[in-house]
Image (cartoon, rainbow, N blue to C red):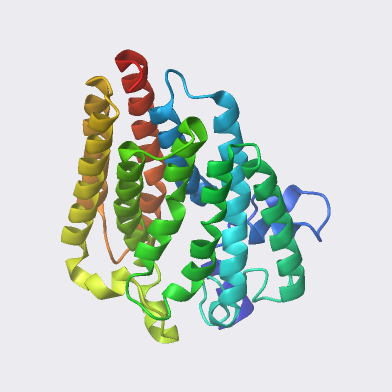
Amino acid sequence: MDERQQVSASDIPPQSWIDRVPGEGLRPYLRLARLDRPIGTWLLLLPCWWATAMAAPGWPDPWFMALFAVGALVMRGAGCTVNDIADRDIDNKVARTATRPITSGQVSVIQALAFLALQLGIGLAVLLQFNTYTVVLGASSLVLVALYPFAKRVTYWPQFVLGLTFNWGALVGWAAVTGGLEAPAVLLYAAGLMWTMGYDTIYAHQDKEDDVLVGVKSTALKFGDATRPWLAAFYGGTITLLAAAGVHAALHPIYFAGLAVAGLHLTWQVRSLDLDNAKVCLARFKSNRDFGLIVLAAIIAGRLLGGAG
């Protein structure tokens, strides 16, 4: 595959805002943290915001919401850095990932490790703004962050490991507000896990041919043409668990009306999905930001009209 083919197939957006940042030496690090592709940050952030809003006695604390936004940004970047270090010998065999900074030689492994340390340091500074229980709980997620990049080498269910990792913020967000964990937090975490299983299976369908070639596994390969019923089950479980969380948190019925709208969005994703069209898969995957924001709005409305749980 020549260089032009690699660039055209790359998952790095051409002519993004990063290309206008002064200093060419900085740009590979911004791309390594995926700052030109914010969807991953949204998907990491939204469970934090769900829990923060559901645990709040009224409006969610804007300081907590801001802290989680910064934390999600740097920890998503840290996770991508860990992933690209682990996958550097795989990424250069796949057109979509061959131009990523580490595998293409723009950033060395040593430089990537230093950048990882910087991101983790910022993440720790954010985490230390919360109570001790939350600090310990948040720090424990690093085990999952370290394990995830290797899951696809040993199991067809790496999306399950990603779900455990990406939705840890549902537990952390609740603990930040209340100082502990309760049933709604656990239900939100489980809902997020099911949600991730759905959206990341969609995402993995972009890579299924390359994954077979390089020998890594995914739910997209496991389910194949039977993916759609699995997505319906995952998304059905998401809505059911979100509803259970709302019941336990004593949210106003308007929350469940909003949840119905969110359910319609997920239904649209499944019904309109073309599993063999990478662009459609990517678009449906990205639309999960909208789903998450609908749920967040429903939680805030349900809390404001329903009072504290």
Q: Which residue is found at the position 35% from the left and 38% from the top?
A: 182
Could you tell me which quadrant the C terminus lies in?
top left
Query: Quadrant location of residue 225?
Result: bottom left
User: Which residue occupies 69% across, 54% down?
Assistant: 119
User: Going 35% across and 63% down the picture, which residue do you hit?
Assistant: 160
Indicate left or right for 256 with 161 as reference. Answer: left
Residue 36 lies, in percent from the top left, at: 61, 51
> Which of 58/84 is in front?
58
Quadrant assignment for the N terminus: bottom right
- As drawn, 133 above or below 217: above
Residue 32 quadrant: bottom right
Q: Position of residue 98 (x, y in %)?
A: 58, 75
- Residue 29: give x, y in percent of width and height: 72, 60
Residue at the spot 60% in from the left edge and 37% down from the top edge: 130
Horizontal side of 229 relative to 181 (left or right) equals left
Looking at the image, residue 84 lies above or below residue 281: below
Residue that extends furthest to the right in the rendered view of this protein: 23
Q: Nearer the viewer, residue 248 or 30?
A: 248
| Whether residue 124 is situated above or below residue 281 in the rendered picture | above
